[in-house]
C-alpha cells in the first residue's frame, strides 16, 4: 500500500506532478506577459525556442474548458522545459499558475494589439508632395 503525504506532494519525489499549459505563438505570448505583469500578475511561462511558442502554466482542469483560437491547452508530464526551452517567467514567482480567465483576456488584447500594429505597418507611407513654385507672369521665361 502506498503512503500518502499530508503535504499534498507526490509520495515519490522523482515523479513531478502533471500540469497543464496554454501554448501560444511567441509574439502574442510576450505581449500577454507584459499585459499581465502590469495588471494582475502572471505565473510561470517558458519559451520553446524550437517551436517559437510560449507556454503559460495554468490550473489542472483548464484544458477541459479551453477553446481560444490560435492557442492550445494540454496536460504535460512533470518536465516543463523540453530541450531548447527557457523560462520567461521562472517558476519561483509569487504565482504558481496564471488564472485562465485573465490569461484569455490578455491573449485577446495581445492579438488585437498585434493586429493593429501590423495594420499600421502595412499601410503605404504618406509621401509629402513637393510644391512647385507658381508660374511667373512672364510666361515661364526667366529674364536673362
Image (cartoon, helix red, strand yellow):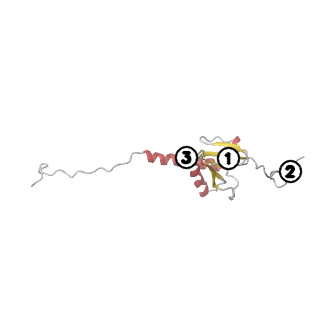
* Quadrant of the image containing the C terminus: bottom left
The crowding category of the residue bearing disc 2, from other C-alpha atoms within 10 Å (few below 14, some 14 to 19, many at least 20), is few
Residue 91: image x %, image y %?
68, 55
Query: x%, y% of residue 117?
Result: 48, 49
Q: Residue at x 71, y 49 (%)?
A: 79
> In the visual, does 73 lie left or right of 5?
left
Determine which residue is flagged by label 3. Answer: 111
Q: Disc 3 to disc 1, how far (Cα)?
A: 19 Å
Tell me where residue 14 appears, x and y as whole percent.
Answer: 78, 51
Is residue 66 or residue 54 the one in the foreground?
54
Q: Residue under circle 2?
A: 4
Reading the chain from its start, which is encountered first: label 1 or label 2? 2
Spatial distance from mark 2 to mark 3, Cα to Cα? 44 Å
Q: Earlier in the sequence, mark 2 or mark 3?
A: 2
> What kind of element bears circle 1?
strand
Q: Position of residue 32 (x, y in %)?
A: 59, 51
* SS for dot 2: loop
Dot 1 alpha-carbon crowd within 10 angstroms: few under 14, some 14 to 19, many 20 or more: many
Query: Residue 113 versus residue 84: which sits nearer the camera?
Result: 84
Against 111, is 36 above or below? below
Amino acid at each position: 500500500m502506498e503512503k500518502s503525504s499530508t503535504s499534498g506532494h507526490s509520495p515519490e519525489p522523482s515523479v513531478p506532478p502533471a500540469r497543464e499549459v496554454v501554448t501560444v505563438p511567441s509574439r502574442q505570448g510576450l505581449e500577454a506577459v507584459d499585459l499581465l505583469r502590469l495588471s494582475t500578475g502572471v505565473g510561470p511561462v517558458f519559451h520553446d525556442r524550437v517551436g517559437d511558442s510560449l507556454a503559460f502554466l495554468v490550473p489542472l482542469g483548464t484544458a477541459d474548458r479551453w477553446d481560444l483560437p490560435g492557442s492550445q491547452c494540454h496536460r504535460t508530464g512533470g518536465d516543463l522545459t523540453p530541450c531548447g526551452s527557457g523560462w520567461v517567467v521562472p517558476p519561483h514567482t509569487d504565482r504558481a499558475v496564471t488564472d485562465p480567465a485573465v490569461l484569455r483576456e490578455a491573449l485577446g488584447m495581445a492579438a488585437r494589439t498585434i493586429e493593429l500594429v501590423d495594420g499600421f505597418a502595412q499601410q503605404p507611407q504618406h509621401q509629402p508632395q513637393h510644391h512647385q513654385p507658381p508660374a511667373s507672369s512672364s510666361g515661364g521665361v526667366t529674364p536673362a
